Amino acid sequence: MTGQLIPTGVTFGVGRNSINDAFSGTSYMNNLELDSGGNFSAGTGGGVMYSGGTNLYNIFSTGSNINLWISGTGVNSISQIGGGNVSSGSSSVAEGISTVAGGNYSHAEGNNTKAVGAQSHSEGLQTIASGANSHAEGFLTTAYGLNSHAEGQNTITIGSFSHAQGQNTTSFGLRSHAGGQDCIASGDTSFIHSKDSIVTGDRSVVLGGQNITGTTDDTVYVPYLNINNDIYLPTPTIPSNSGDTGSAGQISWDSDYVYICVSTNTWKRSPLAGW
């Protein structure tokens, strides 16, 4: 690094020193080590050395390791040297190997990751965060949706505010959640954690099992339910006749009968008696 150090009112002693006096080229050095012979070297406790002439940043971590950084193409951005990293967004950071921080205020780290959306963050291996404020982590994950989060392996978030985790899951719906393996949540505010299943109903849930398709809105799909305590039906919908609207398995009651829908729009009832 070239330039002239012009200290003003600074006293140096053996050990670590912090210097904030300007070099020509507007360069700064922090946390240097001064040995007994009067020579400066990189401090072992962490620090930063910036060369304005070459736009090089030397980041000293604990110990003797040195990470080299360089100014990126974006305003106030930096990239780690030696890994083919690119920081093109304003105030972005690219580190690791073949990472791209293209969004303003974005951060890409790991191996072959891309943070394209503004304020996005990608990490891991071959992940992409393209939605604004999105986060992609793991392996082959992609966060397209605004404020979305993709994690695990080969997961995709498309809906805004959505979340995908596990393996081969996709959250299409707004505010949806997809978890497990090979599952899709496409309904608005839907939730799924299963295997080889899909939920398309808005505000619907699929829990457990496999090969389940949940299409009805406001419905919870559970393949097998083991309840240890009582079941309460506080506000039952009473069918007006045996052909009233209903779905197979639906149960209702009043003070005289228990009603069960045995097939679509077909009800049967059994009288209740005291004892």
Image (cartoon, rainbow, N blue to C red):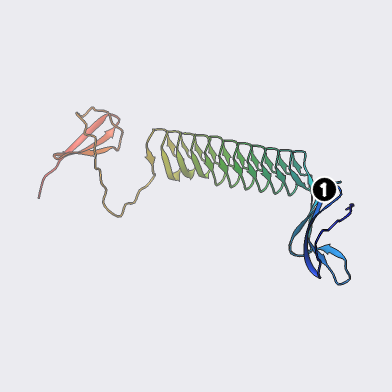
Residue sticking out furthest to the front: 9
Q: Residue at x 64, y 44 (%)?
A: 121
**Measured from the top left, where is residue 223 in percent x and y?**
39, 44
Q: Residue at x 66, y 42 (%)?
A: 106
**Measured from the top left, where is residue 54 in percent x and y?**
86, 46
Type of the residue with mark 1: Thr
Residue in front for this viewpoint, 193 or 119: 119
Residue in front for this viewpoint, 197 or 253: 253
Q: Is residue 261 above or below residue 70?
A: above
179 horizontally vs 132: left or right:
left
Q: How many dots with numbers?
A: 1
Label 1 Cα neighbours within 10 Å, binned few <14 / some 14-19 / many ≥20: few
Residue position marked by numbered label 1 in the rendering: 26
Occupied quadrant, residue 150: top right
Occupied quadrant, residue 157: top right
Q: Is residue 61 above or below residue 128?
A: below
Residue in front for this viewpoint, 26 or 240: 26
108 horizontally vs 204: left or right:
right
Label 1: which secondary element = loop
Occupied quadrant, residue 266: top left
Residue sticking out furthest to the left: 275
Q: Residue at x 58, y 42 (%)?
A: 155
**Measured from the top left, where is residue 49 in percent x and y?**
80, 54
Q: Residue at x 79, y 69 (%)?
A: 15
**Measured from the top left, where is residue 190 in percent x and y?**
45, 38
Q: Is residue 157 visible?
A: yes
Q: Is residue 182 visible?
A: no
